[in-house]
Amino acid sequence: MNKCAVYMLSALLLTVFILVTAYSQDDMMFVDNSVFSKPERTAAVFEHDAHNEMAAIEACDECHHIYEEGIRIEDESSEDQMCSECHDIEATGRVPGLMKAFHLNCKGCHLGRKKGPIMCGECHPR
């Protein structure tokens, strides 16, 4: 095999590797933290469908909840809204601030089920 063929084959293999790696990351998603002006950590890694399948979550309102006057409304979902539409950066009355809301919802569920990540670096990669 001549040098040109070796270079061409190497380039082809590298291209295939890059494409496979890029598309395998396609399902990787992050919790949107763009509303924080100076986030303390990276956005939490969260692949929605894989998470829900692993956690056996079928009802959207388990995570995407709606409260009225401090009472959770059953079977009502906020899945078409950003969390920041209801949660300000800082707490407002009985409504927790956005960061606390994320942690209460996600980490609180993990603690309650005794499954899932609870340490900072397990959700927020460096």
Image (cartoon, helix red, strand yellow):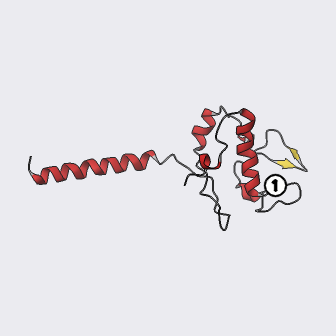
Which residue occupies the extreme bottom position in the image? 37
Q: Which residue is mark 1?
A: 96
Q: Nearer the viewer, residue 60 or 37?
A: 37
The amino acid on which the numbered mark 1 sits, given as a three-letter code, is Pro
- Quarter of image, res 39: bottom right
- Is residue 120 visible in the rendered image? The answer is yes
Coordinates of residue 64 in the picture (x, y in percent): 73, 45
Coordinates of residue 93 in the picture (x, y in percent): 89, 58
- Is residue 78 visible in the rendered image? The answer is no
Q: Residues within 10 Å of mark 1 (few under 14, many from 20)?
A: some
Which residue occupies the extreme right position in the image? 69
The residue positioned 64% from the left and 41% from the top of the image is 117
Which residue occupies the extreme left position in the image? 2
The residue positioned 63% from the left and 62% from the top of the image is 34
The residue positioned 81% from the left and 55% from the top of the image is 96
The residue positioned 60% from the left and 43% from the top of the image is 48
Does residue 83 appear to the left or right of 8 in the view shown? right
Q: Secondary structure at mark 1?
A: loop
- Quarter of image, res 33: bottom right
Does residue 69 appear to the left or right of 34 in the view shown? right
Does residue 82 appear to the left or right of 6 in the view shown? right
Does residue 56 appear to the left or right of 26 in the view shown? right
Coordinates of residue 71 in the picture (x, y in percent): 89, 45
Quarter of the C terminus within the rendering: bottom right
